[in-house]
Image (cartoon, grey):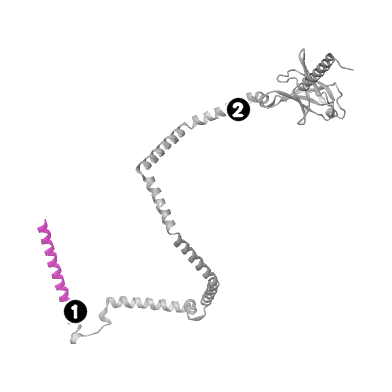
Amino acid sequence: MKIRRELKVGVFAVIVILVSWWGIKWLQGHNLLKTSATYYARYDDVTGLMESSRVWMRGVDVGSVTDIELLGDEVLVEIVIQSQYADMIKSDAVAQIGSAGLMGGQQISIIQGVAEDVLPHGATMQSRVDGGLFGMLADKGSSIFDGLNQTLDGVNGIIGDNSANIAQLVANLESMTAAIDKVLAAGELNAIVGDLHTFSSALAENTGRIESMLANLEGFTGDVADADIVAKLDATVNSLNAVIAGIDSGEGSVGKLLNDNSLYESLNTASENLALLLEDLKANPMRYVHISVFGKSEEQIAAKQAKQEAKAAKRAAKEEVKQARRAAKNE
């Protein structure tokens, strides 16, 4: 039995129509190969939400928006959820419209709820609109601008109260920059950099000597540690402390000399008597010295001394007269 050409064309056309219809439904968010559950939600405004917008639950794509219808003052949104997720939607679940990203667009996020019973198919969910970042900015815009205004007023007040200080600071900065310019113009900075370069070059050239000095110092410290000088110094200090303790207790000649008060008093009395004797010797030397040169008496010695004093007085008078004459000539 031969199939006529018209029948083949008809069957092919039906298949094309079915495939096209399935593709259109798939593009609208309906997957005819999977069973689904339908729910509804009512909103005052669904700006940005479109048919085929995705529906999410805990970050998982569970369905799509299949229809949006305006009913008076409300907007009725039809939501289709895959059947495998329908049992997770509780009776107090919320369908929240939120931003799909920075590029714009809206999506629905289902908050499951905590009730024990499951929301039946075809029921209407509770609804809510999340303004997102821009909505938050719009709500908080007035308070943010008020805070900014207060901050700017405070800054202006601080600047106004300290205008003189700010002017002085600016003047100081100008003088400092002028001084820096003078230093740069005079070439002092280049000289300083040159000196630093010379110093660093000298250090580099004498690196070997510096390392040798450090090695010698390290060797010296090692020798000091090996010689146990600290222990020897400790023993010497202990011995010196013992000697000082013996002197303090009156042991030995030095101890007796330092601790015997009678010896101190005797020495003090002897020094006082010696001082009196020297003063009397200076006042009356002839009382203690009786030496006669070539048999001369004391009277002759006194007469000779008087003559010498008279000659000395005459020489002094002549010298004064000469000085007076010189002064007169100079005038």
Q: Residue at x 12, y 61 (%)?
A: 324
- Viewer-closest of 200 and 80: 80
Callout 1: 10 Å neighbours few (<14), some, many (20+)?
A: few
Q: CA distance from mark 1 to mark 2?
A: 116 Å
Outermost residue toward the bottom? 295
Q: Please identify the quarter of the rendering in which residue 174 is found.
A: top left
Kindly identify which residue carries mark 1: 302
Q: Please identify the quarter of the rendering in which residue 89 is found.
A: top right
Please give left or right for residue 144 compared with residue 256 in the image: right
Kindly identify which residue carries mark 2: 147
State yes or no: residue 231 in magenta: no
Q: Residue 132: percent from the left, percent from the top?
A: 69, 26
Q: Residue 105: percent from the left, percent from the top?
A: 70, 23
Mark 1 or 2, nearer chain start: 2
Quadrant in which the N terminus appears? top right
Please give left or right for residue 172 compared with residue 77 in the image: left
As helix, strand or loop, the secondary structure at mark 2 comes to helix
Q: Residue at x 13, y 70 (%)?
A: 315
Q: Amino acid at mark 1?
A: Ala
Figure check: 129 above or below 277: above
As helix, strand or loop, the secondary structure at mark 1 comes to helix
- Please give the range of residues in magenta: 302-331
Please name which of the two marks, 1 or 2, marks the residue nearer to the observer: 2
Q: Amino acid at mark 2?
A: Gly
Callout 2: 10 Å neighbours few (<14), some, many (20+)?
A: few
| Total numbered badges shown on the rendered structure | 2
How would you classify the magenta stretch by its main secondary structure? helix
